[in-house]
Amino acid sequence: MTTPLRKSLYVGFAGLSIIGTAAACAPKAESPAVETPATQNGGQVSTTSPSSQGSAASGASSYKDGTYSADGTYTSPNGQETVGVELTLAADKVTAVNITTHPSNPNTKKFQGEFAGGIAAQIVGKDIDELNVSKVAGSSLTSGGFNDAVQQIKSQAK
Amino acid sequence: MPHPGWSLFGFEGIGTQWEISTPDALAAGVRNQLLGTVSAYDEVWSRFRPDSLVSSLSRSPGRITLPDHACGLQRVYSALYRLSGGRMTPLIGSSLERLGYDAGYALATSGSPQAPPQWEGTLEWTGRELMVTKPVVLDVGAAGKGQLVDLLGEVLRASGHTDFLVDGSGDMLHAGTHPVVVALEHPYNPKQAIGTVELANSALCASASNRRAWGDGLHHVLDGATGRPIQTTVATWTMAASALEADALATALFMMEPGPLEDEFEFSWLKVSSAGAATYSAVFEGRLFS
């Protein structure tokens, strides 16, 4: 199912990202005037169609669930650059955002690389026993002394 | 054990559990060197033992001469103190003791939270030379474990081991041709993970406030500006070339946004807020469960 996401959301989101990129790209020595055009041009979304596999949203949802993507262009001090934005919608909420970069020169690659990453609205847990892993990184195990002391406090508090 | 058939050397040191994995069993001499490195580190830096080198500074001001590895620790702490505006500081020990995380594990507050003294005017630390102008409780807990992971890695390399995983209870250094998949512990449920990462020739460190906690809102990651436990971030992970940097940066992420840190350090990061939202840099892309 291919469902065009409302353009306003696209432009709004892509624009936001691109402004962030432009700011991150601005070399500290550059005058603000150089980055101004980038900000103003931010959100020039190309005609990439959203690829949506989402199911039809029920009820009063404004947007169909699914994963949407678009490329945005901006003018950096290095010339025209493109970033891709992919977001996943579920029940009108953005549940995942991916920024993909396809820079045309090394400097931009560095700056876009720093910006790339993302957010998850809510972490999701899976039982470690069910994962094929042998190592876990998290809070450090504590020593016997600390644990004993905590136990004592807990028993005192009862 | 990270790989079937690998040999595991486990021990307790600096207040936590350690596991060193290698394809072949470690020789007795190497094991002794590893244990010796751990005790030597503890004898210098532990604020939990009265006979440590830094403990002397809590009784009276003065100057101490540290081992060579202090240079790396000083560089990282100096940079992060500056970048965090004093919120990450090796002087945090007095604030931890105030809240009960002291050598006797009192685990009871002895007053309202108190900010530690400022580095400026209190601490002069250049490489191996460290001087304080008044008694202070030094605490390098934010980076020390990571550094010890690195030091153990050096012992292994020096004895010819090219494949290993040093795991200081979640702070890890990997070397060799066999990557290890590591689960990222759920900050609210230690039986669960929120994702996995592949670790190969790099360090992975985590910082979380859930386990070293001893009361309502009391845990060991304190804000150096206020002396209060930080409540907005609950867990962070970092990957960097050294465990020293990764460990220190994982704590720094509790206190500040990643941007300024990325200007000075090469690292990847994942940060989970107390609301359960995660933000991350590119390496963690696609690694979280959804």
Image: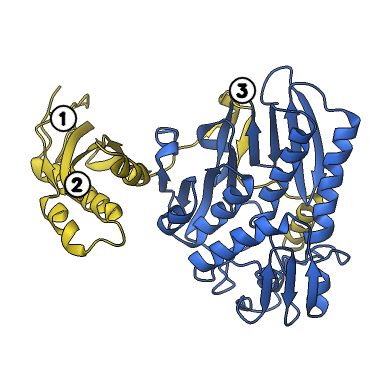
Per the rendering, the mark at residue B21 is none
Q: Quadrant of residue B79?
A: bottom right
Give whichever of A127, A158 is nearer the camera: A127
The image shows residue B92 at horizontal and vertical percentages of: 65, 69
Give whichever of B280, A46 is nearer the camera: A46
Q: Residues within 10 Å of mark 3 (few under 14, many from 20)?
A: few
Residue wearing tag 2: A13
Count all numbered tags in the image, as a single digit. Answer: 3
Residue wearing tag 3: B177
**Three-letter code for the amino acid on which mark 1 is drawn:** Pro
Q: Residues within 10 Å of mark 1 (few under 14, many from 20)?
A: some
**Chain identifier matching the blue colour in the rendered picture:** B
Which chain's residue wears label 1? A
Residue wearing tag 1: A50
**Three-letter code for the amino acid on which mark 3 is drawn:** Thr
Q: Are marks 2 and 1 on the same chain?
A: yes
Is residue B141 visible to the viewer in this orientation of the structure? Answer: no
Choose the circle earlier in sequence order: 2 or 1: 2
